[in-house]
Amino acid sequence: MTGFTQLEEIPKIHAALRKTFRSGITKPIAWRRHQLHQLARLAQENADEIADCIYKDLGRPKQEAIMGDVAAVIERSLIVASNLEEWAKPEEPTVQPWQQSWNTRVEKQPKGVALIISPWNYPFILSVQPLYGAISAGCCAVIKPSEFSPHVSAFLAKAIPKYLEASAYKVILGAVPEITRVLELKWDHIFYTGNGRVARIISAAAAKHLTPTTLELGGKSPVLVDSSADIDISAKRILWGKVNNSGQICVAPDYILAEKAIVPQLIDSIKKHSQDFFPDGALVSKSYGKIVTDAHFNRLKGLLQRSKGKVVLGGQWDEKTRGIEPTVVIVEEEDALLEDELFGPILPILPVESIDEALQYLQDRDYPLILYGFSNNKVNKQKILDATMSGAVAFGDTFQTVAVNEVPFGGVGESGHGSQNLKYSYDSFSYLRPVFDIPFQDEQFFGARYPPYSEKSLEF
Ligand code: NAD
């Protein structure tokens, strides 16, 4: 991608944002609200162009991009704008009776100048969602979108200064050299969305400046299916979560742990629904995307070639379009497909004797971003909740849960820390500052605290 930000420009951008933040212009609520309205306008007025850029980068159907990305950004920016005044109000805690004259309040303050680093898989919303958090908190921000989604990145670089206050919000374009330069500088918060390997680089850079981070990562989000589930509906919903964006979703169902007895029925249902979704085949369907780059495509191809599992659906790919069919593989433990996050339309099924065996399997593994359970059995559902840790748990569906705005979205352990969504995004870019205003008249009550101490001062 051409048009990367010049390395020598990066410290200048950083210094300019710091100057803007110190000027205080980002702090008034009315100003923040206006920027949020502008952000919604940016998404609304450019919906077609955004969908077009997403299509060029990911082959993602327009309907998915408009519904999943553009509409969500408009809705969330407006919700944040209308709730901001309430969220930003200082809290007035109930304090001890002897402190009641101190006018104690907890103010919500912007952290300062934030750095937002976003990935290619949802290149628009994953750049702009942290941005509405930064704006609402009163921060300045730089967005560093992914070099692997160049059309959306270029769009952001063009549109953000046009719609938002250009002295407060900037886009830096680039790859590893540029982001390495960016990370040498001191930021007041780093909001990173991407993989765990790079998250370690970000964390190490942040640690040098004691910069707090939000890390929105991924991992292998498992799906548990027991014999009490409605297998047909489960199959349809799991498949949908896997084929959307060609499986390149942080909360895509990564693999299935299914009770042995229902595996044949589950496979039959997945096959049937795949046929219904893509009657002429996924590789020629306008409702199916592609893999983002040759490197990602070759990684997935390599995994399929290394897997010792039995392919029961799909397994074909198209080098030219970088399409990979929805591919279901029955595997045994230790299979290549069970090693790292797949991030593609490959769905391994590991048959298990029981939910207990599945839970044991999960307990030996990293905490995923989300855990999916398909069951009609209350006891099993509770066992799943009690025996596991994950960023979130969803019974009965996949992926759709990201549409719930009012809950925190984030991981735990290897899947990250911190969270986002509406007020949670606001909170990520704010810090709490208690303010006390102790009247001079209270001096009469403070006599006992000053030296010299005496036994008398200990009398209650
Ligand atoms: P990516 O390759 O686009 O990387 C993400 C960002 O990191 C980019 O802006 C990139 O420029 C930057 N980067 C790359 N190398 C770097 C380096 N050496 N130093 C500093 N920055 C660097 O995207 P990705 O990581 O392939 O994204 C996919 C991953 O993101 C998956 O693991 C997925 O689960 C996760 N993800 C998580 C969420 C979430 O909200 N939790 C959302 C989407 C994706």
Image (cartoon, grey):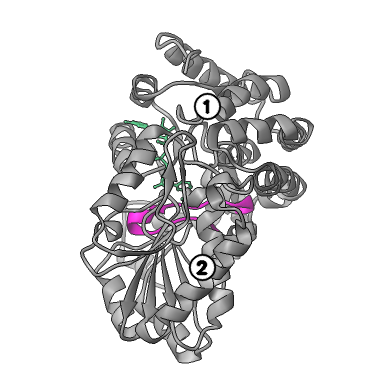
- Quadrant of the picture in which ligand 1 is shown: top left
Residue toward you, 431 or 443:
431
Which is more N-terminal, label 2 or label 1?
1
Q: Are marks 1 and 2 in contact (CB under 8 Å)?
A: no
Q: Quadrant of the C terminus?
A: bottom left
As drawn, is 428 to the left or to the right of 312?
right
* Looking at the image, residue 388 lies above or below residue 111: below
As measured in the structure, the alpha-carbon distance from the residue carrying label 1 to the one carrying label 2 is 45 Å
Residue toward you, 371 or 300:
300
Question: Was residue 196 drawn as part of the magenta stretch in this picture?
Answer: no
Q: Secondary structure at mark 1?
A: strand
The amino acid on which the numbered mark 1 sits, given as a three-letter code, is Val
Q: Which residue bears the numbered disc 1?
A: 142
CB at disc 1 and ligand 1 closer than 8 Å: no
The amino acid on which the numbered mark 2 sits, given as a three-letter code, is Lys
Q: Secondary structure at mark 2?
A: helix
As drawn, is 35 to the left or to the right of 416?
right
* Looking at the image, residue 385 lies above or below residue 426: below
Q: Which residue bears the numbered disc 2?
A: 271
Q: Which residue is painted at 49% across and 74% down in the image?
A: 268
* Looking at the image, residue 310 lies above or below residue 304: below
Q: Which residue is painted at 33% across and 39% down in the image?
A: 298
Q: Quadrant of residue 61?
A: top right
Question: Was residue 413 drawn as part of the magenta stretch in this picture?
Answer: yes
Q: Which residues are magenta?
A: 408-423
Task: Where is residue 220? Give x, y as percent.
Answer: 37, 59
Q: Residues within 10 Å of mark 1 (few under 14, many from 20)?
A: many
Extreme residue in the left direction: 334
Q: Could one spot residue 196 in this view of the protein?
A: no
Q: Could one spot residue 135 in this view of the protein?
A: yes
Q: Quadrant of residue 405?
A: bottom right
Task: Where is residue 9? Give x, y as percent.
Answer: 46, 10
